[in-house]
Amino acid sequence: MNAHARKSTPWWLSAPALVLFTVLLLVPLGLTAVLSFNVYDPALGVKSGEFTLEHYIHLFTDSYYYGIFWRTFWISALVALICVLIGTPEAYVLSRMRNPWRSILLLVVLAPLLVSVVVRAFGWSMLLGPEGLVNGLLGVFGLGPVKILYTETAIVIALVHVMLPFMVIPVWTSLQKLDTGVENAALSLGATPFTTLRRIVLPQVMPGILSGSLIVFGLAASSFAIPGLLGGRRLKMVATVVYDEYLHELNWPLGAAVALVLLVANLAVMLSYNRLVEGRYKKSLG
Amino acid sequence: MTKNGPFALAFNALVIAFMLAPLVVVCVVAFTPENTLTLPTTEFSLRWFRAVFEHSDFMQSFWNSLWLALASATIATLLAVPAGMAITRYSFPGRDFLNALFLSPLIIPHLVLGVALLRMFALVGGTGSFGFLIFAHALIVTPYTLRLVVAALVGFDRSAEQAALSLGASQATVFKRITLPMILPGVTGGWLLAFISSFDEVTMSIFVTSPSTVTLPVRMYMYATESIDPLMAAVSALMVAVTAVAMIVLDRLYGLDRVLVGGHK
């Protein structure tokens, strides 16, 4: 095999995938970017020859969109925070269990990831509804019924359920690298379990916690089925608004603009934060 | 190693209950004999499962989803094996770009992909085509197959390949008789993970399906926004069952913990 053929081999091997990704990913994203600058006329539809910044200006000045972006942001941040508070200790507790419980329970926590999100959303709408199990339980204690379904609370609860595995996985991965000898050394030198946890374990799982919260935030901000089914018709998040613009309002350029703002925000958070986390921990942990 | 205290175990039990609650409720309510979403108290009934099988829209969507998942997972695997070989075995300018590009559907919101593909299909007149839908799904499940193929190729001892080559085997023979059998667990694991992901996908599909190509999750989403009755619970229970079967096979072939913990960073 000559040098030239060798050089082109990896490109030939990747060519089929590259064609698919060019035709169905790069080109469509480019077309959507162009579309978001197209003039939209409610009577005539999209005018492909005329360009405007109107949709983007509209997004950042109209209080309706402003409110939706804000709601999406705080719900995602809250979901990420709750996932940190539940997922980190859960991964820690699981990692200290013995087999077979350790692997069985880890799978129980992670496996819902593979069940369709529509099924999980539907499950929560049954649990949180006015006649649901949660209100039934509250009734036993003489409370309620409380309106949970179609409120932000329902969205947050269901999103935490969907996102928790994404938090447990990176924390679990960093816990596997933890040297239990160091933990035992701290304990034998007289540190309390709490100090050991705070000074030895926590700093070492911090990269896992940070990358987990990042993934959770990004996925929550772009979630569609959960706010669509548990937020009802009035509580919109970014993804459900894009759906409305596309399939009900038929204002594709505006919908494309919202989708691209979401994409850029998502990529910016993921990439910059990732770099920050990696840079900081590569230095301190070697 | 220190043991978990009672507080830690109680916390663990609560988290497990929280994770299982919605799935268990769906599966139990599916057996209700009533007309409303109630827990079956006196008897278990299969009437809602029968209703699902007699509901032509749900059945059509089920078959759509099944064929779609089979086809797109197969295409994704056929693309990921050579691409994975290129990425792991050659160092060439553009390698990092290709790797990032092929994994990008994991970080690009499916909503954005749905919007972008809808635009593309509208321009080329492919809206509602099942063929386009298959390739759209192949795109979003390729990262899963690629990851497991790459993982299999990275921990690969190449001495057997070199021995075969030095004994005069052709490149094709080496791939067919040595490389492929050795990475087969990764390939089949990736295929199954791709199958499950495609079968479950709703956000992108809702933009690019037409009435005749609606997939099961999309049909369920639309049904649930309009009415909530035990029929939906029965369909959900069947979804859980299909996923569970695929998961058990995946676990036997590849190890579910490896897929889940190694499959998502």
Image: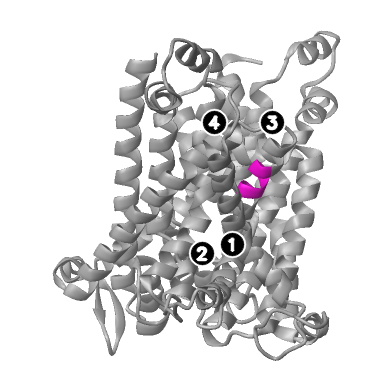
* Mark carried by residue A46: none
Q: Secondary structure at mark 3?
A: loop
Contact (Cβ within 8 Å) of mark 4 with mark 2:
no
Q: Give left or right: position of A180 versus B255.
A: left
Q: Is residue A6 above or below residue B201?
A: above
Of the residues shown, which amino acid type is indicated by label 2? Met
In the picture of the structure, the residue carrying the numbered disc 2 is: B204
| Subunit under mark 2 | B
Q: Nearer the viewer, mark 4 or mark 2?
A: 4
Q: Give left or right: position of B125 versus B40.
A: left
Q: Is residue A97 above or below residue A156?
A: above
The boundaries of the magenta stretch are A105-110
How far across and down, in percent of the image, does residue B242 sit?
76, 62
User: Are labels 1 and 3 assigned to the same chain?
Assistant: no
| Subunit under mark 4 | A
Q: In 3D space, how far apart are the residues under numbered discs 2 and 1 (Cα atoms)?
A: 7 Å
Question: Looking at the image, which is closer to me, A237 or A19?
Answer: A237
Which coloring applies here?
one colour
Q: In 3D space, how far apart are the residues under numbered discs 1 and 3 (Cα atoms)?
A: 35 Å
Question: Looking at the image, which is closer to me, A193 or B49?
Answer: A193
Of the residues shown, which amino acid type is indicated by label 4? Thr
- Hey, which quadrant is residue A192 in on the image? top left
Residue B216 in view here = yes
The residue at 80%/86% (across/down) is B54
In the picture of the structure, the residue carrying the numbered disc 3 is: A98
| Subunit under mark 1 | B
Q: Secondary structure at mark 2?
A: loop
Contact (Cβ within 8 Å) of mark 2 with mark 1:
yes
Q: Is residue A134 above or below residue B46?
A: above
* Mark carried by residue A173: 4
